Every structure is written in C-alpha cells, then in structure tokens.
Amino acid sequence: MHITYNNYIFVRINLYFMDTKLTLKIDRKVVDKAKDYAKSKHISVSYIVENYLKSITQTPKNQDKNFISPIVDSLSGIIHLPDNYDYREDYYNHLVQKHK
C-alpha cells in the first residue's frame, strides 16, 4: 500500500501590485525539497514559484516565430562549436552511420 502525503502551500503572486493567495496541492517530498532549496538560496518558495510562472507566461510584445523562451535562453552558450562547424554535414554522417 502506497500512501502519498500532500502539503498545501500558499503562493504570493504580484498582480498589478496586489498580492494574491493561491493554494496548491503538492507532494510533501517536493515541498520539503523546495523549502530546503529556497533556504539554501535565501529566497522563499513563493518567490521561486512566482518567477517560474512569470517565465512560462511572459510573451514579448512583438512575438515572432524566432522567440526564445527565457529558460532556453539561459542555456545559451553552454556548447561551444568551431566557427566552421556544419551541422547538416554532421547530421548526414550520423544518418549514414545509423542506417549502415
């Protein structure tokens, strides 16, 4: 028998300079880990949740098909490739090897 304990947390969301309470039902283990993480970073769980929600809901004013989300943008620069790197040739070679 598996018992899941849930914990309720209240999240502060800034909405037009007004704070709003939000009740979430989250697994106790996740809440405990989030609290430990927040404490180690000297921030609140509310701050983490609020900023995550901002990052996934924010849309640029002139949104276009080349828009890069903030999370993806934060990964920019992790991989450094040579200037002459040709991804098409590399992918072609990968396909040739795969279908030998």
Image (tube, rainbow, N blue to C red):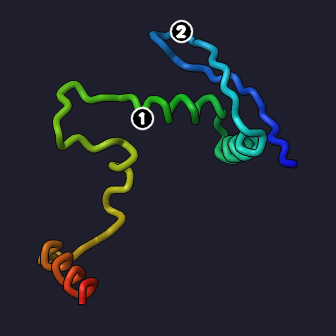
Q: Position of residue 64 (x, y in %)?
A: 16, 35
Q: Closest to the observer: 94 or 87? A: 94
x 66%, y 33%: residue:
44
Disc 1 target residue: 55
* Helix, strand or loop under label 2: strand
| Amino acid at the residue labelled 1 | Ser
Spot occupied by residue 8 in the image (x, y as percentages of width and height): 75, 27
| Distance between the alpha carbons at the discs numbered 2 and 1 | 19 Å
Instruction: Kindly identify which residue carries mark 2.
Output: 18
Secondary structure state at the residue bearing disc 1: helix
Q: Would you call the spot at circle 2 few (<14 residues within 10 Å), some (14-19), or many (20 or more)? A: few
Q: Position of residue 54 (x, y in %)?
A: 44, 29
Q: Is 15 located above or below residue 32 in the figure? A: above
In the image, what residue type sits under mark 2?
A: Met
* 44 relative to 83 in the view: left or right: right
Do the residues under discs 2 and 1 have CB atoms within 8 angstroms? no
| Residue appearing at x 32%, y 68% in the figure | 79
The image quarter containing residue 87 is bottom left
